[in-house]
Image (spheres, helix red, strand yellow):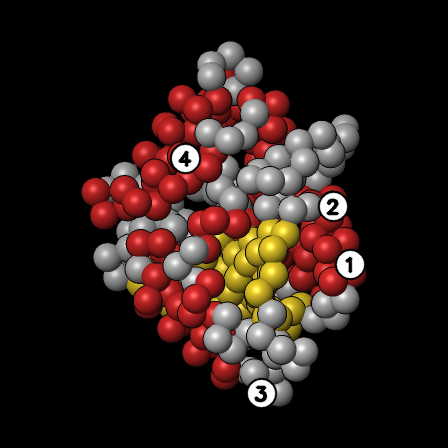
Amino acid sequence: MLYYKTYIKDNDAPWVTFIHGAGGSSTIWFKQIRYFRKDYNILLLDLRGHGRSQEDRWKKGDTFGHLADEIIEVFDHLKIERTHIIAMSLGTIVAQTIADKYPRRIQSLVLGGAILALDVRTKILLFIGRHLKRVIPYMLLYKFFAYIIMPRKAHEESRLAFINEAKKMSQKQFVKWFTLTRLVNPYLSHLQISTSTIPTLFIMGEEDYLFIPPVKKVTQDHENFYCEIISNSGHVCNIDKPDKFNLTADRFLRSLDGIV
């Protein structure tokens, strides 16, 4: 089972599950825990191969669906029937996959730095990465992508947080996760349709230039999808601007009738 940690307010409090992105761990949510534990039960997870979770779970043909199943195992173990999910970066794909496969378990989605589609620049970067991933040390590749996605001085704390966590991964785990990027574009188109009935808030940093355009488009196309842009923030907006991120996410959760 995945490594997890809980903060329990009381038996009647709603659950919020936090899912980190590739290369990170549950520690990236350190600026959210104190705020949300006042009113919610909190579940923090380390995805496979990250943080304190096991490394040897990969089988040939594993997909985002298998990653979602592992999180459902934790829900079942803790007897969590329904939960809000707050996710970041590549973790937003895992979150949407859970909502796709197990919609009755999900009350709402808050997706920070959401990845909904890959533009030409991103496709080229991933193509280069997939061909170099077994040749060069993975941390060089990871740092390269971190600087491309979070290039500014204001993004330094976020960038370093993910780089430091990624150092705990093995080359094998990095390669396995990177391989999943081949599935992303057609799969994401499916997710946007299949999860459209679930209230979803996208929180994006205004400097997240690679991923904002498709988020703006999808929120125009679906009435249950909403978008908030945080100024002076990059891809990992929960670290860049934690106060604004927390208030925005919390306001959304409280606005859902019968949930909070």
Q: Could you tell me if residue 230 is visible in this image?
A: yes
- Residue 176 versus residue 117: which sits nearer the camera? 176
Left of 85 or right of it: where is 201? Answer: left
Q: Give the mark nearer the N terminus: 4 vs 1.
A: 1
Q: Give the mark nearer the N terminus: 2 vs 4.
A: 2
Residue 236 rendering spot, x and y as whole percentages = 38, 50
Residue 77 rendering spot, x and y as whole percentages = 78, 58
Q: Quadrant of the N terminus?
A: top right
**Residue 217 location, quadrant:** bottom left
Q: Are marks 4 and 1 in contact (CB under 8 Å)?
A: no
Residue at image point 50% right, 70% down = 37
Q: Are marks 3 and 1 in contact (CB under 8 Å)?
A: no
Q: Are marks 2 and 1 in contact (CB under 8 Å)?
A: yes
Q: Return the mark for residue 164.
A: 4
Q: Return the mark for residue 135.
A: none
Q: Quadrant of the C terminus?
A: bottom right
Q: Return the mark for residue 257.
A: 3
Q: Give the mark nearer the N terminus: 3 vs 4.
A: 4
Q: At label 2, which amino acid type do we have?
A: Met
- Residue 226 versus residue 217: which sits nearer the camera? 226
Left of 250 or right of it: where is 61? Answer: right
Distance of label 2 from label 1 (alpha carbons): 9 Å
Question: Which one is in front in this view, the residue at disc 3 or the one at disc 4?
Answer: 4
Q: Give the mark nearer the N terminus: 2 vs 1.
A: 2
Distance of label 4 from label 1 (alpha carbons): 30 Å
Badge 4: how crowded within 10 Å, few (<14), some, or many (20+)? Answer: some
Distance of label 3 from label 1 (alpha carbons): 28 Å
Distance of label 3 from label 4 (alpha carbons): 40 Å
Q: Return the mark for residue 1.
A: 2
Residue at image point 43% right, 55% down = 30
Q: Secondary structure at mark 2?
A: loop
Residue at image point 68% right, 46% down = 2
